[in-house]
Image: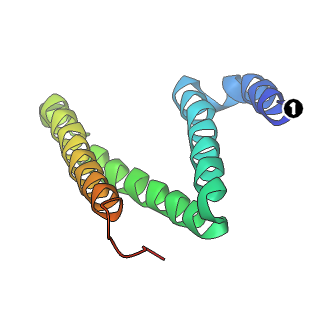
Amino acid sequence: MVVAATLVVALTAAAATLGSRLSGLLATFPVYAGILAVFAHGQDGPGPATRALRGLLAEALRLRRLLRGAGRAHQARRGWVRAFAAALAVTLVLQAVALWIVRRASEPGAAPTR
């Protein structure tokens, strides 16, 4: 609670300097990443939390590259749609694979995953 309040106060104080876009991004990313890391850590320790944060960073950088390429004025709208459609497609595929793995591991007689 104290960490969240400190984050909000610090970002509010820096918003004039950072600008609305960057301060808005910084307001959501640490909260999302922190929650993801805590839940992943609670499962099996620091290994899953580290992998979750690395994956989150890698995907954020990929999306940034896609969006940067979409920044040209004549193709901006189409590029943004393509970038988010690609991110959504990758997310859905990864979630489907994860669901398949979880269901397969929970079948009776399945070998332990560790």
From the viewer's side, name the closer residue of 21 and 40.
40
Is 54 left, or right, of 105 in this rendering?
right
- The answer to whether 56 is drawn above or below residue 54 in the figure is above
Dot 1 corresponds to which residue? 2
Amino acid type, residue under disc 1 in the picture? Val
Is 21 left, or right, of 113 in this rendering?
right
Task: Please state the horizontal and vertical placement of residue 90, each as a whole percent of the image.
Answer: 23, 51
- The answer to whether 60 is drawn above or below residue 80 in the figure is below
* Residue at 57% across, 32% down: 28
- Can residue 46 be seen by looking at this rendering? yes
Task: Please state the horizontal and vertical placement of residue 98, each as a whole percent of the image.
Answer: 31, 56
Of helix, strand and loop, which one carries label 1? helix
Q: In which quadrant of the rendered view does residue 30 lie? A: top right
From the viewer's side, name the closer residue of 81 and 106.
106
Disc 1: CA contacts within 10 A as few (<14), some (14-19) or many (>=20): few
* Residue at 83% across, 31% down: 6
* Residue at 44% across, 60% down: 55
Task: Please state the horizontal and vertical placement of residue 100, each as a whole percent of the image.
Answer: 24, 56
